[in-house]
Image (tube, helix red, strand yellow):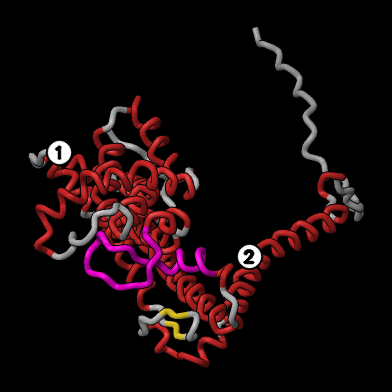
Amino acid sequence: MAIPAFPRPDMPGPQPVAATNVTAQTVQRSPLLRTSSGEIPDRIFKWLITACGVAVLGVLVLIVTELISGSKLSWHAFGFKFFAGSDWDPVSEAFGALPFIYGTLVSSLVALVIAVPLSVGVAVFTTEMCPKVLRAPLSFFVELLAAIPSVIYGLWAMFVLVPLLSGYLEPFLGKTLGWTGLFTGPQYGIGMLAAGIILAIMIIPIISSITREVLAVVPQHQREAALALGATRWEMIRISVLRNARAGIVGGIILGLGRALGETMAVFMVIGNRPEIAKSLFAPGYTMASVLANEFSEATGDTYLSALVEIGLALFVVTIIVNALAQLLVWTVTRGQPARGHV
């Protein structure tokens, strides 16, 4: 019996698609995409930010212009001999800035000799050996020293540091190291040594914080490599950490030097304020910053005032150069990397 065939289903073939007419339609923008209403606030904001940046440069230009114009009389009267002369006699209008330059350099050098080992030691301990629990409090208290006003340092030095120097430290130094000529003369406690010590205390936070940031950005694998080769912790710190961070450490030291060069009130209160050049650190002296604080209000003659302004100009230029060099050295190591601690 034959099976009947099923009827063929009606499957129509593909039919041509009717052409669609594409007409140009206006695209409606969302209100969030419209920028016409925000152009004016953006321009105002741009002008304000630009004005802030230009204002800083304008203030710097005004300071330099005022210092140059105020020191013209001294420049014409003494020239470059002003920085080589050692006479400071306002009555006869004989002025020389060499004693102040000498006092600034000596007090800053004493401060660096004392502050650099302490600052580097604190930074190494904080980043490499300090427990995590004590790391933040220790860093906070070290940096807190930078927030203390300089006049407070000066008062502390007068009532605490000077008696300690005159009663204990200076007699000891005179007996043991007096043969060097650096620790001879009357032991009153006020002089270059006191100024150097108080400056060292004031610049420790700066050098320590910069050194800590520089040490923290040293790659961790360098530490691990040194330890894997059998180095002790001290050898690892000396070879892998300090050697790679030496440029940044030098930059932090120079930043501290810039602070020491421009410090005024604390030095003014303990240095003795005498324009003389002496070999002994027990002798009183003068710095460029302290002479401005002490004598600027008493300057009566035009030449006297112009000489003080010229000292201020020299101090300003030196400080700018020192700080710029320090920032460059620190940047060569950190390059904007965030600081991080290591156990």
Q: How many marks?
A: 2
Q: Amino acid at mark 2?
A: Val
Q: Is residue 314 left or right of residue 177?
A: right
Determine crowd level at label 2: few under 14, some 14-19, many 20+ residues with C-alpha closer than 10 A.
few
Q: Which residue is identified by label 1?
A: 233
Residue at 47% across, 43% down: 148
The residues bearing labels 2 and 1 have C-alpha atoms spaced at a distance of: 46 Å
Residue at 44% across, 45% down: 155
Q: Quadrant of residue 70?
A: bottom right
Q: Which residue is identified by label 2?
A: 56
**Residue sitting nearer the eye, 65 or 176:** 176
Circle 2 sits in a helix, a strand or a loop, which is it? helix
Residue 239 in the image: state x and y as whole percent. Answer: 16, 50
Residue 325 in the image: state x and y as whole percent. Answer: 39, 67
Q: Quadrant of the N terminus?
A: top right
Which span of residues is magenta-colored? 271-295
